[in-house]
């Protein structure tokens, strides 16, 4: 699934939602619909002002409130409409949802340990990471495919979903996806379209991309 569009110079900005109370408490959110905190709203407003400078052509977001409300801040400063899609939701984590990492380790010790070892695990009976990529990546590629040459798409989603989508669009094997570090609340990653498909240009960024000056541009 590397590539997927025919134009040149398109960009995909994958933007994680702002802070929630469950983020602070280190509770697994998954598909639970949690609101942004006041800090999360402020994060979204700050980031939106920066991302608006990229002059995005379209915004697509998870339909969960924390992503939708983050996207709304960018819509306010750009005048763009937000399209929401349930396929961009966070990984469904079944019985783990609502529990802290410590609670999960206590109740689901071997399953939690296997996940930490990088094994494919249905956390709490939920989704595999590959299944998340199966639902999310096609939506991202579909919206990217509607961009003009040189256009920018902003995808507002969740840390796990963003990581799996990046892995899929880069053509990486699923066991390597964990090599992509997590995203801080309201930070983003940028994929750029080149002659050989999508490339990771920025990861977990909180400032605007700068040109790559050197031999590997």
Image (cartoon, rainbow, N blue to C red):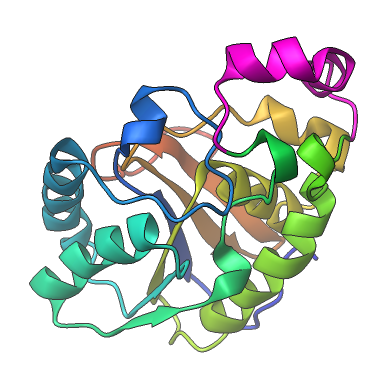
How far across and down, in percent of the image, does residue 81 sit?
A: 27, 85
- In the rendered structure, the answer to whether residue 208 lies left or right of residue 174 reads left
**Residue at position x 72%, y 45% in the image:** 94
Q: Is residue 159 above or below residue 61?
A: above
Nearest the viewer among 32 and 117 is: 32
Relative to 29, residue 136 above or below: below
Q: Residue at x 80, y 52 (%)?
A: 171
Residue 156 spot, x, y in % from top left? 41, 60
Q: Residue at x 72, y 39 (%)?
A: 95
Magenta stretch prevailing secondary structure: helix
Position of 137 with respect to 148 (left or right) is right
Residue 212 sits in quarter: top left
Q: Is residue 99 magenta?
A: yes
124 is within the stretch colored magenta:
no
Nearer to us in this view, 132 or 124? 124
* In-image side of 104 versus 40 (left or right): right
Q: In which image quadrant can residue 19 be found? A: top left
Judge from the rendering whether residue 17 lies leftward or rightward of residue 72; answer left or right.
right
In this rendering, does residue 7 appear at all? no
Q: Residue 170 location, x and y as percent?
A: 71, 51
For the N terminus, give its image quadrant.
bottom right
Q: Relative to residue 174, is residue 154 depicted above or below? A: below
Q: Give me the residue at 34% from left, 66% from top.
A: 68
Q: Is residue 36 above or below residue 157?
A: above
Query: What number of labels is visible?
Result: 0
Tell me the magenta residue range.
98-120
Instruction: State the image coordinates of residue 123 (x, y, percent, origin top left).
Output: 78, 36
Q: Is residue 122 visible?
A: yes
């Amino acid at each position: 699934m590397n590539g997927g569009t025919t134009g040149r110079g398109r960009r995909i900005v994958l933007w994680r939602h702002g802070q929630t109370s469950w983020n602070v408490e280190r509770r697994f959110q998954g598909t639970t619909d949690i609101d942004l905190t006041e800090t999360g709203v402020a994060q979204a407003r700050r980031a939106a002002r920066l991302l608006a400078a990229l002059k995005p052509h379209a915004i697509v977001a998870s339909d969960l409130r924390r992503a939708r409300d983050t996207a709304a801040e960018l819509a306010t400063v750009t005048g763009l409409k937000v399209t929401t899609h349930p396929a961009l939701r966070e990984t469904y984590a079944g019985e783990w949802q609502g529990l802290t990492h410590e609670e999960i380790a206590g109740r689901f010790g071997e399953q939690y340990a296997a996940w930490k070892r990088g094994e494919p695990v249905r956390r709490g009976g939920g989704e595999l990471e590959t299944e998340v990529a199966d639902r999310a990546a096609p939506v991202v590629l579909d919206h990217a495919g509607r961009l003009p040459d040189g256009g920018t798409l902003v995808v507002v989603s969740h840390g796990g979903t963003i990581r799996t989508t990046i892995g899929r669009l880069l053509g990486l094997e699923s066991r390597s996806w964990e090599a992509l570090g997590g995203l801080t609340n309201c930070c983003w990653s940028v994929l750029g379209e080149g002659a050989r498909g999508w490339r990771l240009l920025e990861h977990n960024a909180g400032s605007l991309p700068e040109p790559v000056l050197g031999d590997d541009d």
